[in-house]
């Protein structure tokens, strides 16, 4: 099995990635001392590349990064690449969720369509890279529901989720259809062919 150094500093993402990759790849912890990586690219691919390259160079080993955005049609695709900082540079999950709910307050249910998009990337010490994308379509609920998951999970109901939000699903159900899981499974195919 290939070993990948995790570039993410978000423990919730790391846990989800490790679960999806279990049995296929070994996810090594993000090295201490890497420091924060500025995620200032214009798109998810660019941000994933910035993180993976920084950790690859620091660790001298293949590094895996992801960047994920929630794209809400009624908001012109926002928060998109700014999803983690939607309510400001120091925002936490609750802040971002509150801003999204405020921005969506006047949007009727038929117009609350959205999608989660994840880009995962592995950068290798030889300068090569592999990237894959995963997307899941759904809607933004009128109110948060559920206690599982993280981030925007309480307000995102995937089209294939039987009306449940990601926060109302267990980890196994979420990982069977989530954007990040789809991206990681596509990446594993690319790694097998490498």
Image (tube, grey):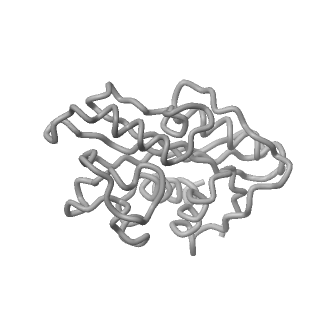
Q: Is residue 119 above or below residue 5?
A: above
* Above or below, 82 relative to 57: above
Q: Residue furthest bottom?
A: 23
Q: Position of residue 7 (x, y in %)?
A: 69, 50
Quarter-of-image position of residue 176:
bottom left
> Residue lying farthest left?
110
Instruction: Please tell me which residue is depicted at 46% across the width and 54% down the height of the picture.
Output: 180
At which x and y percent is residue 82?
51, 32
Which residue is drawn at the image coordinates 24% and 46% (left, top)?
142
Residue at 41 percent across and 36 percent down: it is 99
Depth check: give the residue in front, 138 or 66. Answer: 138
* Residue at 21% in and 33% down: 107
Residue 31 in the image: state x and y as whole percent: 81, 55
Residue 108 on image: x %, y %: 16, 36
* Depth order, front residue of 7/87: 87
153 left or right of 138 in image:
right
Q: Can you say whether 5 is above or below 23 in the image?
A: above
Q: Relative to residue 177, is residue 189 drawn left or right?
A: right
Image position of 74 with respect to 67: above or below:
above
């Amino acid at each position: 099995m290939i070993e990948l150094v995790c570039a993410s500093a978000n423990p919730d993402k790391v846990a989800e990635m490790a679960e999806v990759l279990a049995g296929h790849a070994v996810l090594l912890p993000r090295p201490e001392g890497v420091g924060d990586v500025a995620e200032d690219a214009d798109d998810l691919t660019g941000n994933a590349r910035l993180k993976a390259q920084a950790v690859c160079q620091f660790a001298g080993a293949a590094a895996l990064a992801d960047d994920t955005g929630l794209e809400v049609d009624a908001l012109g695709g926002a928060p998109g690449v700014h999803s983690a900082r939607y309510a400001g540079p120091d925002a936490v999950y609750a802040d971002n969720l509150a801003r999204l709910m405020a921005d969506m307050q006047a949007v009727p249910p038929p117009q609350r369509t959205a999608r989660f998009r994840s880009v995962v990337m592995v950068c290798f010490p030889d300068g090569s890279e592999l990237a894959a994308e995963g997307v899941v379509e759904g809607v933004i609920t009128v109110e948060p529901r559920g206690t599982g998951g993280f981030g925007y999970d309480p307000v995102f109901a995937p089209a294939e989720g039987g009306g449940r939000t990601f926060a109302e699903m267990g980890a196994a159900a979420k990982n069977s259809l989530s954007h990040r899981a789809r991206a990681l499974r596509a990446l594993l195919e690319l790694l097998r062919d490498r």
